[in-house]
Amino acid sequence: MTTKRALIKELAQRMECTDVAAKKFLNSYIELITEKLSEGEGVSIHYFGKLVPHYQTERPGRNLRTCLLYTSPSPRD
């Protein structure tokens, strides 16, 4: 698995720019995708794939120690 630091180094070499410029580009790119996903929009990158927000609903659960039933809330609440 490649780390973010290794991606920045590789990106700087391919773009023929400094590590600082590559880091700024990568951080902006990640921030933009994160904003779009948090707004509920999907992001489609040609030849890479689609990033689509997934919303989980409430679901029933059980405490295994006490056997009490409860409702697990949605992570968005």
Image (spheres, grey):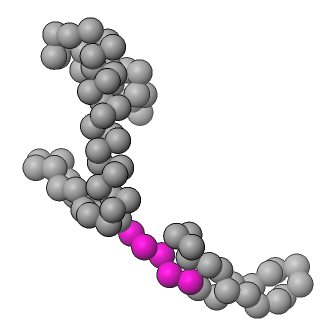
Image location of residue 73, percent across then percent down: 62, 78
Q: How many marks?
A: 0
Q: Is residue 57 left or right of residue 8?
A: right
Residue found at x 67% / y 86%: 71
> Residue 34 colored magenta?
no
Q: Quadrant of the N terminus?
A: top left
The residue drawn where x is 33% and y is 40% is: 30
Q: Viewer-proximal residue, 29 or 48?
A: 29
Q: Can residue 73 be seen in this snapshot?
A: yes
Is residue 61 or residue 21 the one in the foreground? 21
Is 56 magenta? The answer is yes
Would you say 8 lies left or right of 1 here? left
Residue drawn at (27%, 19%), measured in percent from left and top? Answer: 22
Q: Could you tell me if residue 10 is visible in this image? A: no
Name the residue located 52 percent from the left edge and 70 percent from the top edge: 76
Q: Quadrant of residue 70?
A: bottom right
Residue 48 is situated, as x and y percent measured from the top left of the image, at: 18, 48
* 65 or 77: nearer the viewer: 77
Start-end of magenta stretch: 54-58
Per the picture, the main secondary structure of the magenta-coloured stretch is loop
Question: In the image, is residue 38 above or below residue 14?
Answer: below
Farthest left residue in view: 46
User: Going by the picture, which residue comes out furthest to the right?
Assistant: 66
| 21 sits left or right of 1 in the view | left
Q: Position of residue 68 (x, y in %)?
A: 82, 89
Looking at the figure, which quarter contains the C terminus? bottom right
